[in-house]
Image (cartoon, helix red, strand yellow):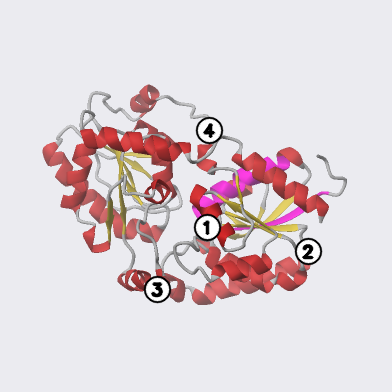
Amino acid sequence: MENKTPLKFFMIAGEPSGDLHGAKLINAIKSIEKNSSFMGHGGDLMSKEGMKIIEHINNLSIMGFKEVIMHLPRILNIFNKTIHLIQKVKPDRIILIDYPGFNLKIAKKIRRLKIPISYFILPQAWAWKSSRVKVMKQTLDQSFSIFPFEKKWYQSKGLPVKYFGHPFIEDEHVNENTKQFYKRHNLNSNYPLLTLLPGSRQQEINRHWPIFVKTTELIKKKYPNIQILLAKSDNVIIQNIPQNYKIEKNSRKAILAASATLVASGTATLECAIANTPMVVCYKLSTISWLISQYLIKIKFISIVNLIAEKKIVPEFLQSDMDPEKIQNNLIKLLDINSTKRNTMIQNLEKVKKQLGSPGVYKKIAESIVKKTMKN
C-alpha cells in the first residue's frame, strides 16, 4: 500500500506509556507507508523511530488536579504553540495518544481546520468525565480502544470504536531467559524475588517509594532471604535506594523474573497479568487530588486488571489504606508458591489475559489509519 505522496502525521503523546505505544505505532505505519513523516510531542522512543520531537514528554507528564494547576501556565503555552504549528504544517492526519486533558482540547480547538483525527488509547470516560464523549463524537475521525469492556461502553454512547486487542499482548522478544536474568543480577533462584514497580511519573515515585521501602523491610523480617528488584526507568529519580536492591530498566524482564510484584496502579498491572505474575496494587494521590477524585470517579476498582475481570482478583491499597503492614501481609501469601491465594490469582490473571486479544494490534491499527488517511 504505497502512496505516491508521503503522508504527514502529527502525533501527540504526553506520558512515558504514550511514548512507548506511539513508537510502536510509528514503526507499524512505516512498514506500510515507509516514506511517511512524523512530528509532534513525544519522548525518546518516538524520536528513535524518526519522529521530530516538538515538545518532550518530560515537559508534559503531570498527574493530579493540584499538579496540573501548578503547571498550568507552561501547559497553556505548549497548547498554543501546538495549535499554531498544526495550522502551519497542515498534516494529513493527527494521531492523539492517551493524555486526554490536553488532547481533547486540541481536538476541539482544531476542529475548524477539518484535519482528520485518530485517537489511540481513549479517555477513560467510563470512569469519570463522561461528558468528554460529546467532544469525541464531534471531533474524532477514528477511535481505537485497548480494553474489551471499553468498546461496548463507548458504542452505547454513540461513538464508533474499533478494538483490536491490547498492545501489551504483542509477542515481544525478550532476549534473556530467567536463568540468564538471575545470573546477570547475581540473584539466587532458590529464594523468592519481589519486583517493585513504584510508577513511571516522578510524582508517583515521590509518594510511593517510602512506603515501598518500609514494606520490604517488614517482609525481610519474615523472609530474610527475600531478594528485591526495582524496575526503574531513566526518566525518574529515586533517592535512598537500599544497597541490597537490584535495579532493572526493562520492566517486562523484571516482571517475568519475579515471584510477585508490588506495583503502582497503571499499565504495569497489565504487564503483570500477561506474565501471570501475582501482584499487590497500590496508589496514592495528593490529598487535594484524592478528595476531588472521590466526587468525580465512578468505578469500583482502580486497577485495570480488576476492571477487566469485573471483580477484585488482585488486592488494592489506596491512599491512607496504603499501609506497609497490610501490604506485606498480602505479599507474603503471594511469595509462597504453594499458597492457595497465589494459585487462585494466577488462574484469574490467565482469564484476564485471554480477554486482551492476540498479537498484531499495532499493525491492524496502522493499517486502519493509513487506509482512512489515503481516502480523505
Along the viewing direction, whichever of 135 and 251 lies nearer the viewer: 135
Contact (Cβ within 8 Å) of mark 4 with mark 2: no
Q: Disc 2 marks which amino acid?
A: Lys
Relative to 82, 341 lies left or right: left
Query: Which residue position holds label 4?
Result: 172
Q: Amino acid at mark 1?
A: Trp
Q: Earlier in the sequence, mark 1 or mark 3?
A: 3
Number of residues whose C-alpha sits closer than 10 Å to that of mark 1, classed few (under 14), some (14–19) or many (20 or more): some
Query: First in sequence: mark 2 or mark 3?
Result: 3
As for residue 62 lying within the magenta part, the answer is no
| Residue 116 picture location, percent across and down | 74, 61
Q: Position of residue 167 (x, y in %)?
A: 54, 42
Left or right relative to 26: residue 132? left
Instruction: Identify the mark at residue 153; answer none if there is no mark.
Output: 1
Reply yes or no: does residue 13 show up in magenta.
Answer: yes
**Spatial distance from mark 4 to mark 1, Cα to Cα?**
30 Å
* Residue in view at x 39 percent, y 46 percent: 309
Rendered image: mark on residue 74: none
Q: Could you tell me the amino acid type at mark 3? A: Lys
State the residue position of label 2.
90
**Which of disc 2 and disc 4 is earlier in sequence?**
2
Span colored in magenta: 6-30
- Crowd band around label 2 with a 10 angstrom C-alpha radius: few (<14), some (14–19), many (20+): some
Q: What residue type is disc 4 on?
A: Glu
